[in-house]
Amino acid sequence: MKINKPTILNDRFVSDILNLKQNKPLLISIAGGSATGKTSVVSKRLFNLFTKIPGVDPLIINQDNFQIGRPFVNSHKSKYKWDDPRNFDLPTCTTTLKELIETNETTIPIFSVHETQRVGSQPLKINPNSIIIFEGLYTFLEDELSDMADYKIFVQSHFYARLLRRIFRFVYELKIPHFDVALRQMILKVQLANKEQVSQQRRRSNLVIHTPYSFTETFKRFDLKNKQLFEQPMEQKVISFQFEPELEVQITSGKENSYFNLIYKNENYYRTLIDDEVIKALSETDPYSFD
């Protein structure tokens, strides 16, 4: 049954999923845009719930490991760049999962985010009671890959929630210090792929989950400090969006430069230069859009 509203992943949900199980590993595919919470929220929650069930052996396979990476980007001109479906080697995803379900063993590639390419592989063995949680951008984009899944979940979140999650992930988790690069890539590449490719999977899903976002939690998690004074008297607001009661995204324009500002409790926690292309893309994007 398809449910197009937020839901709670609880013991009842897990029980219903287990009723689908036959004498083979059960495949749950989780798809959704970058920074929607597929890994940190939904997959983690499902894994923890299944772990509590005696005799059930859950595991998570991240589709990011199937990326081709820099060799793809260097040899293909793509408007989506890293988020191009071809970069995720979907045929190999299909054959690998099929082999794992049919024989209970396979080999999974290992992708290095910092080296932006595959750095090896690892053997994987499971038992027939395993629950395979396969999560990533394009886990059921193509027909064959979609048909393999016993249950499909699509995860979505509002545009600015995805934008901020991805920025903080790049800066604090992946240790990539260039805030402006993360911002530009998200707005001009990732968002386009989400709208034109990723979101197309929603119609194939059995369940759609909307994940919320709290900057207050982000603030505490990363122990954020304000970067500079909020007052910029020589600049004018171009875009202003109140994301939470105490959180505002501002695009400001001065005599020579324009800036992206993240204002929390009237203090500026992030500020970076942006150009007209980024401003245009932001102005054309509905902040409440899931696409």
Image (cartoon, rainbow, N blue to C red):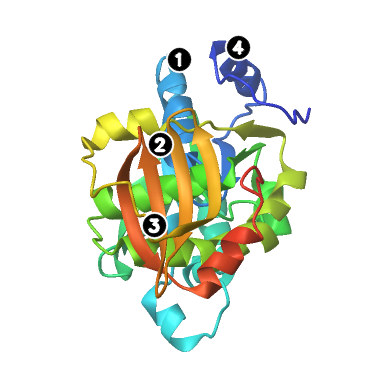
Disc 4 from disc 1: Cα separation: 12 Å
Question: Badge 1 is on which residue?
Answer: 53
Question: Badge 2 is on which residue?
Answer: 40
The amino acid marked with disc number 1 is Ile
Question: Badge 3 is on which residue?
Answer: 107
Mark 4 against mark 1, which lies toward the viewer? 4
Disc 1 from disc 3: Cα separation: 27 Å
Mark 2 against mark 4, which lies toward the viewer? 2
- Asked whether the beta carbons under mark 4 and mark 1 sit within 8 Å of each other, the answer is no
Mark 3 against mark 4, which lies toward the viewer? 4
Rate crowding at label 2 as few (under 14), some (14 to 19) or many (20 or more) other CA atoms within 10 Å. few
Residue drawn at x 35%, y 54% as measured from the top left = 232
Quadrant of the rendered image containing residue 91:
bottom right
Residue drawn at x 65%, y 45% as measured from the top left = 290
Secondary structure of the residue carrying tag 1 is: loop
Residue 66 shows up from this direction: no
Disc 2 from disc 4: Cα separation: 21 Å
